Each structure stands twice: as C-alpha cells, then as structure tokens.
Image: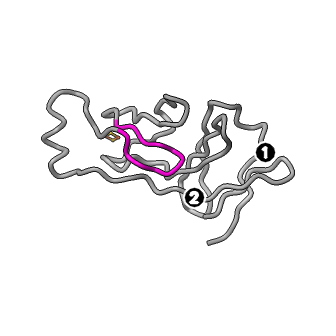
C-alpha cells in the first residue's frame, strides 16, 4: 500500500464524485459534507461503473444498473439490487457484497488516497 496524490480539494465540489485510475486501481473519490472518501469504481453486484451512479442521502452511491446502494464511508450495502423486477433471481448467485474502500487524507489542499 502506498499513498498517492489524486487531485486538489477544489477539483471535486461537495456532493460530487470523480473516477481515477491510480496504479491500475480504478477508484472513485467522493466529496461529502463530512469530507473525502474513496471506494472501488465497479459495483460489487455485476460491475457497473459507479461513477455513472447518483449520490443520494448525502453519503450513498446508487448503482446505475440495478440500484444497489452503498454507504461510501465504509462500503456497506444499504440496499441490494432491486431493479428491474426479477433481478432477485440474479441476486441468488450475486449475493450482497460491500465495496472496497480506501483511506483518504487531505493535506495542504491535496487529496491523498492509500492504494
Ligand atoms: S451492477 Fe450495480 S446493482 Fe447491479
């Protein structure tokens, strides 16, 4: 693991997110009211890119494919895939799995992520 400079604080407004490829790891950095957080880019359900999803409830990313929701602060599943109707059949083999998260630190206006 090594700490990598990802962007400047001002590059991601509060309430926004951004995708980065760092050391072959695809991650998303989120800027919440309470600070910066980072998760894996791809959904743990069937691998949709979560940077195409929507930040909801202030701290959750909602997947654009089947609407699973994850707390980006710890990667926990808030709600598993539930769209379209019938997706539960797929869920039988793609059970709930949290997102990987990465430690984030801000120093001198720069966002650093441990990869
Ligand atoms: S790929 Fe994300 S919920 Fe299915």
Name the element at disc 1: strand
Name the outermost residue toward the right. Answer: 108
Name the element at disc 2: strand
| Crowding at mark 1 (Cα within 10 Å: few <14, some 14-19, many 20+) | some
| Count of numbered circles in the view | 2
Asked whether disc 1 touches disc 2, contact meaning CB atoms under 8 Å apart, the reply is no
User: Would you say 47 lies left or right of 22 here?
Assistant: left
Specify the color scheme: one colour
Q: Which mark is residue 8?
A: 1
Mark toward the viewer: 1 or 2: 2
Name the outermost residue toward the bottom. Answer: 1
Q: Which residues are magenta?
A: 68-78
> Which image quarter: residue 30?
top right
From the viewer's perspective, is residue 105 above or below residue 16? below
Q: Which mark is residue 102?
A: 2
Q: Residue at x 78, y 45 (%)?
A: 8
Q: Assess whether residue 58 is covered by the magenta stretch.
A: no
Quarter of the image for the C terminus: give it. bottom right
Quarter of the image for the N terminus: give it. bottom right
Name the outermost residue toward the front. Answer: 34
Figure quadrant, ligand 1: top left
Q: Assess whether residue 75 is covered by the magenta stretch.
A: yes
**Marks 1/2: CA–CA distance:** 17 Å
**Earlier-in-chain disc, 1 versus 2:** 1
> Which image quarter: residue 9?
top right
From the viewer's perspective, is residue 7 above or below residue 81? below
Q: Residue at x 38, y 52 (%)?
A: 98
Q: Which mark is residue 57?
A: none
Give percent across and percent down for residue 69: 39, 37
Give percent across and percent down for residue 34: 66, 39
| Crowding at mark 2 (Cα within 10 Å: few <14, some 14-19, many 20+) | many
Of residues 42 and 107, the one drawn nearer to the viewer in this rendering: 107
């Amino acid at each position: 693991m090594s700490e990598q400079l990802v962007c400047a604080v001002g590059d991601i407004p509060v309430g926004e997110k951004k995708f980065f490829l760092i050391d072959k790891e695809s991650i998303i950095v989120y800027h919440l009211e309470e600070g910066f957080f980072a998760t894996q880019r791809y959904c743990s359900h069937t691998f949709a890119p979560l940077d195409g999803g929507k930040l909801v409830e202030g701290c959750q990313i909602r997947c654009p494919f089947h609407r699973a929701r994850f707390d980006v602060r710890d990667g926990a599943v808030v709600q598993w895939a539930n769209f379209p109707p019938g997706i539960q059949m797929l869920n039988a083999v793609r059970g709930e799995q949290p997102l990987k998260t990465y430690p984030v630190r801000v120093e001198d206006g720069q966002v650093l992520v441990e990869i």
